[in-house]
Image (tube, helix red, strand yellow):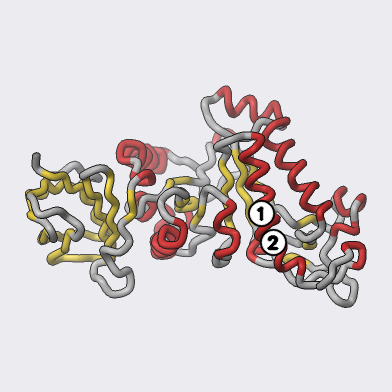
Amino acid sequence: MKALVDRIHQEGFRAQLWWSPLSAVPNSELLQNHADYELLNSDGSPRKVSWWNSYYLCPADHRVVDYHQALVRKILVDWGFDGLKLDGQDMNGVPACYNPAHHHSRPEESVEALPDFFRAIYETAQSVKPGSLVEFCPCGTAYSFFTMPHFNMSVASDPTSSFQVRSKAKTLKALIGDTVPFFGDHVELSDGANDFASTIGVGGVVGTQFVLPSLAKKRSKSDLNPDREKEFEKWLGIYRQKMLSRGQYLGGLYDIGFDQPEAHAIRKDQTLYYAFFAKTWRGPIALRGLENRDYTVSDYESGESLGTVSGPTGHLAVAFEKHLLLEVQPHF
């Protein structure tokens, strides 16, 4: 593992380990040596984590917490990884634990201990490698508010559409704020498997599952062909140039359920960035949140100038399909 991470670093990248905490497969070495770590049902049977084909571990048992903290140190220090991707729908909540080896005063102690379990993982990561990334992905399910203080990257969590990418961004930014970046998840999960605009437009971090065909034994739908490489280069360039993931998301300016077309706004210094989404749109749009002054408007995807508007609300007649990304700069 250390040699793998060293090679990744030599190529100029950072390395993040995909990890499903609080679960163990039935024939794992961990359960063979520590079967008493398991969370048990009232009839004494192990509680299965659906889909993962794993058993729950009990977050209220200090040995389970100690094991995970030691593993964090091994991953980040001994192996040299730069961050963690915590993944699994079991992370949102656990059932009551009836394992007599844990000496619970109440079975519900396991339920109540879950946030502190993830706090221990997060604080250990930051203590051994300050600034290390701890991404929390509840595997396609909704987030639990109680775990939100204990990670520093949220994620769209296996979205089934571009709208889910954008609506999850709006919700998570409302709950957490802009200090925790939002990963729009792999672009292959968006509409058309190529909608980078939905992540960039809401101030998200872009990502892909693209595979280099020369290194793969089997062809896949994620192969990085020449067309995809050109598209990826374009959008990654826009992301790096604008870095809207570091801006202030102005979630109160537009209502995602009632305003048409769907709109999102981000402020960076005195410049505002707007993203509009619709299957097709021809008509006026409102640029809210401006000061009482004149602004220059441009399409930051195409570079086309769209004229000027005046605040506090600018009005513009536009026509677009799928999305329109605007940069609005004040006149000085």
Task: Tell me which amino acid carries mark 1.
Answer: Phe
Residue 95, position in %: x, y? 74, 71
Depth check, front residue: 45 or 63: 63
Residue 330, position in %: x, y? 13, 45
Question: What's the residue at 80%, 53% (across, down)?
Answer: 64
Q: Quadrant of the N terminus?
A: top right
Question: What's the residue at 59%, 63% (across, down)?
Answer: 146
Question: Is residue 73 visible to the viewer in this orientation of the structure?
Answer: yes
Depth check, front residue: 243 or 323: 243
Label 2: element kind: helix
- For disc 1, the neighbor class at 10 Å (few under 14, some 14 to 19, many from 20) is many
Q: Which residue is mark 2?
A: 114
Q: In this rendering, is residue 127 above or below 205?
A: above
Q: Residue furthest bottom?
A: 43
- For disc 2, the neighbor class at 10 Å (few under 14, some 14 to 19, many from 20) is many
Label 1: element kind: helix
Q: CA distance from mark 1 to mark 2?
A: 7 Å
Q: Which residue is mark 1?
A: 118
Q: In this rendering, is residue 98 above or below 33?
A: below
Label 1 with label 2: CB-CB less than 8 Å: yes
Q: Quadrant of the C terminus?
A: top left
Q: In this rendering, is residue 179 above or below 5?
A: below
